Image (spheres, rainbow, N blue to C red):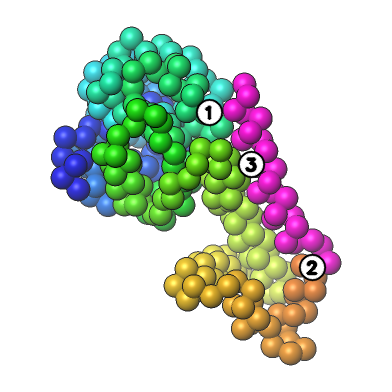
Amino acid sequence: ADMLANTRVGFIGAGQMAEAIARGLDKAGVVPANKMCASDVNVGRMKVFESLGTSVCSSNTKLAETSNVLILAVKPQVAEKVVTDMKPSLSKDHLLVSIAAGIPISKLQDWAGEARIVRVMPNVACMVGETAAGMSLGKTATPADSDLVTTMFESVGKIHVVDEKLLNAVTGVSGSGPAYIFMAIEALADGGVAAGLTRDVAMSLAAQTVLGSAKMVLETKKHPGELKDMVTSPAGTTIAGIRELEDRGFRSALINAVVAGAKRGEEMSKY
Ligand SMILES: NC(=O)C1=CN([C@@H]2O[C@H](COP(=O)(O)OP(=O)(O)OC[C@H]3O[C@@H](n4cnc5c(N)ncnc54)[C@H](OP(=O)(O)O)[C@@H]3O)[C@@H](O)[C@H]2O)C=CC1
Ligand SMILES: O=C(O)[C@@H]1CCC=N1
């Protein structure tokens, strides 16, 4: 972690993801809030960061003057203007970590000039230290840059180095995936309410079931199919439910959602 000793992190855009990452890094003690700075077009968003203990900058350009690691956390649609406007204040001493969905490293490098580039696709669970992320390195990114970004995101979950052409697949599975699980938790709870539980008990049971199931996969290292078979007693309740899910294409719905997200990421990279 001493590699982070001289790191000052600047958030270009202080929205949902920037906040999730900032909170996670600070909570993990990897980058304290007082070594972070945020810049956003919304004063309200910068006030949120100030309440976290970070400083704020009145412009993205000023951010480049105070921070050596910049996290591009604006929407993809505005990324080109934001980065090109910062280009004059970027140098080889800057590491630009982009979390913008679908924006290729080659474009980021054109826009940013000399800055070193690392592209990360995290997810919103950075906020609770359980993100699932993928990363790819730009040509001028150094091994130290790779270690730094790995350390940063390992402090808020898990990160995998992947070939850049697979980052859209990462977006499909884990970038967007939390939304699909949030919907599943809400639907499981609705089922619980339909069967007579109060909403709060149903929601708690549903969320805990997803958490427990994920831990079973990660900690037992058993195949999810094998774990599913551990639950399905002969002529029991689970297989009755599974038949409903199979009839409605539960599995293909999730498969297609991931592929659709990856495809959309591919489209976004062609802007
Ligand atoms: N949400 C998620 O779960 C994930 C998002 N991402 C990626 O992270 C990025 C940010 O997403 P998210 O946090 O959800 O988006 P948000 O809209 O919450 O955050 C972006 C923030 O940047 C502000 N902004 C707009 N223009 C500028 C500018 N010129 N300079 C500085 N700030 C500006 C926005 O203001 P305003 O609202 O007024 O435009 C907003 O406050 C996106 O590229 C997305 O693809 C990646 C993984 C997961
Ligand atoms: O929906 C999006 O485009 C962003 C990227 C991954 C999650 N949210």
Q: Is residue 183 above or below residue 221?
A: above
Between the residue at mark 1 and the residue at mark 2, the CA separation in whole angstroms equals 36 Å
Judge by depth and name the residue closer to the eye, 233 or 198.
233
Q: Secondary structure at mark 1?
A: loop
Q: Which residue is mark 3?
A: 262
Mark before the other along the chain sequence, 2 or 3: 2
Marks 1/3: CA–CA distance: 13 Å
User: Pointer 1: what residue?
Assistant: 103
Q: Which residue is mark 2?
A: 246
Closest to the observer, 179 or 44: 179
Q: Quadrant of residue 59?
A: top left
Q: Which mark is first along the chain, 2 or 1?
A: 1
Name the disc covering residue 156, or none: none
Q: Is residue 36 magenta?
A: no
Q: Where are the magenta residues, as a range? A: 246-271
Category of crowding for the residue at label 2, using alpha-carbon neighbours closer than 10 angstroms: few (below 14), some (14–19), many (at least 20): few
| Residue at left offset 63%, top offset 33% | 266
